[in-house]
Image (spheres, rainbow, N blue to C red):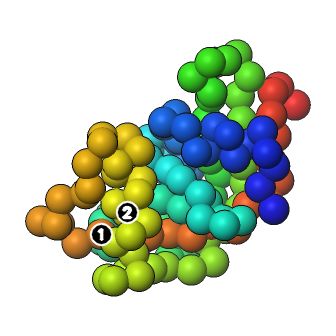
Amino acid sequence: MIRPDVRRVLDSTALAHLATVRPDGSPHTVPLWIGTQDEHIVFLTGPQSRKARNLRQDPRVALSLVAEDNPYEPIVVRGRVVEWLEGDAAWPIIDRIAVKYTGRPYPRGEERVVAVVEPGRQTVGVG
């Protein structure tokens, strides 16, 4: 279940930073657009991106965000990718996230997939 104070930031236009684990065990981090779908966290990516390849090998994630109205209260969510959506199942979520950040649906020129994250530990503030 996503905590209400965490959901508020996930549903805003704050950027998230995603940390994954590379095949050699080293960390990989990247900023990304993010959203929610029921009690899951969702983000879009290319099916062959580094983050997608990392997550298909090891589904654990760490997400870091800060609320635009309070950058001094960090939010960290740990969880795991429990599902990948593609094609017709993915595009409504992709478009909803793109509209949130840009005001427009996502262009159809590139293949995209959606990672569905089951949140685990959620920390708000320094902890």
Task: Count residues near mark 2 (Cα–Cα under 10 Å), then give few for <14, some for 14-19, many for 20+.
Answer: many
| Mark 2 element type | helix
Left/right placement of residue 1 relative to residue 16 reads: right
Q: Residue at x 73, y 61 (%)?
A: 119
Residue 93 on image: x %, y %? 43, 66
Pick the front one: 55 or 125: 125
Q: Amino acid at mark 1?
A: Arg
Pick the front one: 85 or 54: 85
| Mark 1 element type | loop
Q: Earlier in the sequence, mark 2 or mark 1?
A: 2
73 versus 27 height, above or below:
above
Task: Count residues near mark 1 (Cα–Cα under 10 Å), then give few for <14, some for 14-19, many for 20+.
Answer: many
Q: Residue at x 58, y 45 (%)?
A: 11
Between label 2 and label 1, give the one nearer the viewer.
Answer: 2
The quarter of the rendered structure image containing the C terminus is: top right
Left/right placement of residue 20 relative to residue 49 reads: right
63 versus 89 height, above or below:
above
Residue 58 on image: x %, y %? 59, 72
Q: Say which residue label 1 marks.
A: 112
Residue 97 on image: x %, y %? 42, 53
Q: Which mark is residue 94?
A: 2
The quarter of the rendered structure image containing the N terminus is: bottom right
Q: Which mark is residue 66?
A: none
